Image (cartoon, rainbow, N blue to C red):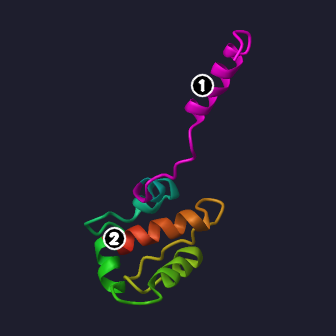
Amino acid sequence: MSASRLPLCLGILSIALIAGPAVASPPDILATKAGCTACHAKDKKLVGPSYHDVAAKYQGSPGAAADLAAKVRSGGKGVWGTVPMPAADAKKVSDADLASIIAWILKQ
């Protein structure tokens, strides 16, 4: 490689290293960004059930992830008490991020 092209190559390499590969956020961070943690905690009841309680309730249920995704999208009332859970808009949390959050919750 000629010396005149070296700065260009180094510049491109620097941009690639800074940008790096797209890395998904961990599900607990996604849950916080989506607003889930305003009402839910990992191991204690807040306004809604803990993630541990949700995981226990749906343990062994083959359709649990799909059921929970539908409940999160449409909101609900009466499953865990009288306080309603507002619907989560797809503009606030994508389907892919929601699936990641739910899979994480079900592993608690």
**Marks 1 and 2, Cα distance to the nearest angstrom?**
41 Å
Disc 2 is placed on an element classified as: helix
Q: Is residue 50 visible?
A: no
Q: Residue 68's x, y, as percent?
A: 48, 80
Q: Residue 47's x, y, as percent?
A: 36, 68
Residues 84 and 25: in front is: 25
Give the side of residue 41 with respect to residue 15, left or right: left
Q: Which callout, 1 or 2, points to the residue nearer the camera?
A: 1
Disc 1 target residue: 14
Which portion, as a residue range, is magenta? 1-28
Residues 22 and 40: in front is: 22
Amino acid under disc 1: Ser
The quarter of the picture where residue 49 lies is bottom left
Q: Residue 46's x, y, as percent?
A: 32, 66
Residue at x-position 59% and y-position 35% = 19
Mark 1 or 2, nearer chain start? 1
Amino acid under disc 2: Tyr
Total label count?
A: 2
Residue at x-position 38% and y-position 70% = 105
**Rendered position, 43 above or below 61:** above
**Rendered position, 98 above or below 16:** below
